[in-house]
Image (cartoon, rainbow, N blue to C red):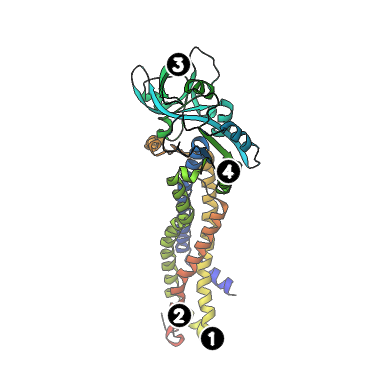
Amino acid sequence: MLFKISWRNIWRSRARSLVIIIAIILGIIGGNFSASVRLGVEQQNFRETVENQTSHIQIHHPDFIANPEARYRIPEGNRIADEIRQNEGVRSVSARTVVDGMAASANMNTGVRIKGVDPDREDSTSGLAGLITEGGYFGEEGRLPALIAGRELAEKLHSGVGSRIVLTFQGVDGEMISASFRIEGLFEVSSLAFEGRNIFVRSEDLNELIGDSDAVTEIAVLLNHPEGYRKMAGELQQHYPETEVRHWADLQPALYYSLEFLNRNLIWLVAIIILGVSFGLLNTILMSVLERIRELGILMAIGMKKARVFGMIVLETSMLAFIGGIAGLALSRVFIGYLNNRGLDLSNTGGEGMGEFGYASVIYPELETSFYLQVAVVVMIFAVIAALYPAWKAIRLVPSEAVREE
């Protein structure tokens, strides 16, 4: 009976009910869209930063972290890399020779980080070949050894594919070495800082120059299950105590804390928007109660208990919230799914500048199913809270006075 009465009551003023339902729908869509964009940006940044640049785990000589020089090699680095590859939880491993140095073209020079890599191993770990936007990926044998540079770095050096670049760095004995390389390809990532500093060459070419054909200064590890990065890092540290093992949260603390804060507080972004809509819902139900004072007084006079009157008001509010909530969640899911497939291109609205902060100009909003369920719970909680004051006003009515209201 209460359900039937409540359903009829909310449609007495059809326009008013539709307005509040539409407000709830738009509030949920707006809140979910804002949350999905924020989460999409951070998740995309995580994937590109960790998988394309940092990897889940890195292993170095303890002194290499403060002084990235060729002399701080990982003892038996290739053997360690081969052993780690046998681990079932590891997707791929890249043993690198990483040194800091200078890159000079005919026009400019700048500081760079030179990474000597095995092309196949590196591609399976960082997807470097897929990041090439111009030129090739270690496919040609020329007079000069090949080099892969970031597009930002190439522009800084006023160079392009085919240009000659002179790299200067220290060998294992501390002596300065200079050698010429040819740019074979240019890669692009969302981070202009990474793109403007890193250079990739074949490890065999770099190792020959530094004076140690088996040199390894960095081992990058990509996992099958990224959530187990802390456990894996701990296990590797125990197996190889003479090295320094760091996971991505150590290497990218700003990204880690950003994701942690986002995961814990994202629902509050939507909750604040829904809270604002709840005041409109409260106003709608309160007006409905004030318009029915005489009717409510008659119901209580003929024996309806105050608890039932209270429940009826709460049920009316819940029905409005339920209709708006279900429609809002369904529409927002369709909308966000569409944007996730198509992408939100911000390049025409200043999005290219986002690269300076490590973000891509095309964003793919995303939300997990569990988040939609959390939003549904928040909507119903706020609906019940919004109904409390109008319901309290209703049960405070004195039947003998209420029935005389015009």
Label 4 crowding class (10 Å Cα cut-off): few <14, some 14-19, many 20+? some
N-terminal of the pair, mark 4 or mark 2, is 4
N-terminal of the pair, mark 4 or mark 3, is 3
Instruction: Using the image, determine if residue 286 lies above or below residue 229.
Output: below
- Between 12 and 322, the one lying in front of the other is 322
Q: Residue furthest top?
A: 143
N-terminal of the pair, mark 1 or mark 3, is 3
Kind of residue indicated by mark 2: Arg
Identify the residue at horizontal 45%, vertical 24% (top origin): 171
Residue 162's disc is: 3
Which quadrant is the N terminus positioned in? bottom right
Q: Residue furthest front?
A: 173
CA distance for labels 2 and 3: 88 Å
Q: Residue furthest left?
A: 107
Mark 4–mark 2 contact, CB under 8 Å?
no
Kind of residue indicated by mark 4: Leu
Instruction: Using the image, determine if residue 256 lies above or below residue 121.
Output: below
What is the count of numbered marks? Answer: 4
Find residue 196 and report its horizontal and vertical position in percent: 40, 30
Secondary structure beneath label 4: helix
N-terminal of the pair, mark 4 or mark 1, is 4
Find residue 335 and report its horizontal and vertical position in percent: 51, 46
Q: Judge whether residue 135 can be spotted in this image.
A: no
Label 2 crowding class (10 Å Cα cut-off): few <14, some 14-19, many 20+? some
CA distance for labels 4 and 1: 77 Å
Identify the residue at horizontal 54%, vertical 16% (top origin): 140
- Residue where numbered disc 2 is placed: 294
N-terminal of the pair, mark 1 or mark 2, is 2
Kind of residue indicated by mark 3: Gly
CA distance for labels 1 and 3: 93 Å
- Residue where numbered disc 1 is placed: 302
- Residue where numbered disc 4 is placed: 236
